[in-house]
Image (cartoon, rainbow, N blue to C red):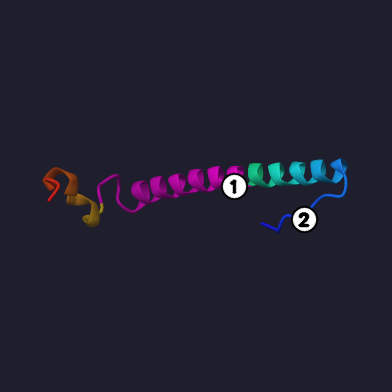
Amino acid sequence: MTPSIPAPCPLLAEVRQLIEAARQRVASAVNAEFTQLYGHIGRRISTELLQGQRGEYGKQRWWQNWRGN
């Protein structure tokens, strides 16, 4: 994010706000796409490499043994 410089006119302030809002929307859209991408990758790994089975690292279900100690 760039440092805030006082706007000499309302038009410039509005343009800055529009740009910042667009940047935020872009970041949100990119995050959503990455989330979907990683989900697809995980499903493909599960289907192709693990044949739907849990990996060795996932066989231990820590939450069933956890008692808050």
Task: Check contact, mark 2 vs mark 1: CB within 8 A.
Answer: no
Q: Which of the two labelled residues, at mark 2 and mark 1, occupies the earlier sequence position? A: 2
Q: CA distance from mark 2 to mark 1?
A: 28 Å
Residue at horizontal 19 percent and vertical 50 percent from the top: 59
Picture quadrant where residue 3 is located: bottom right
Residue at horizontal 29 percent and vertical 44 percent from the top: 52
Verify whether residue 52 appears in magenta: yes
**Secondary element type, mark 2:** loop
Per the image, the residue denoted by label 1 is: 30
Per the image, the residue denoted by label 2 is: 5
Q: Position of residue 22 (x, y in %)?
A: 71, 43
Give the extent of the magenta segment: 27-54
Q: Position of residue 53 (x, y in %)?
A: 25, 47
Verify whether residue 21 appears in magenta: no
Number of numbered labels in the structure image: 2
Type of amino acid under label 2: Ile
Residue at horizontal 72 percent and vertical 55 percent from the top: 4
**Secondary element type, mark 1:** helix
Q: Is residue 27 left or right of residue 49?
A: right
Q: Is residue 8 left or right of residue 35?
A: right
Picture quadrant where residue 24 is located: top right
Q: Is residue 35 left or right of residue 64?
A: right
Q: Which is the main secondary structure of the residues drawn in magenta?
A: helix
Q: Nearer the viewer, residue 28 or 20?
A: 20
Q: Nearer the viewer, mark 2 or mark 1?
A: 2
- Please indicate, yes or no, whether residue 34 appears anywhere in the rendered image: yes
Q: Nearer the viewer, residue 45 or 9?
A: 9
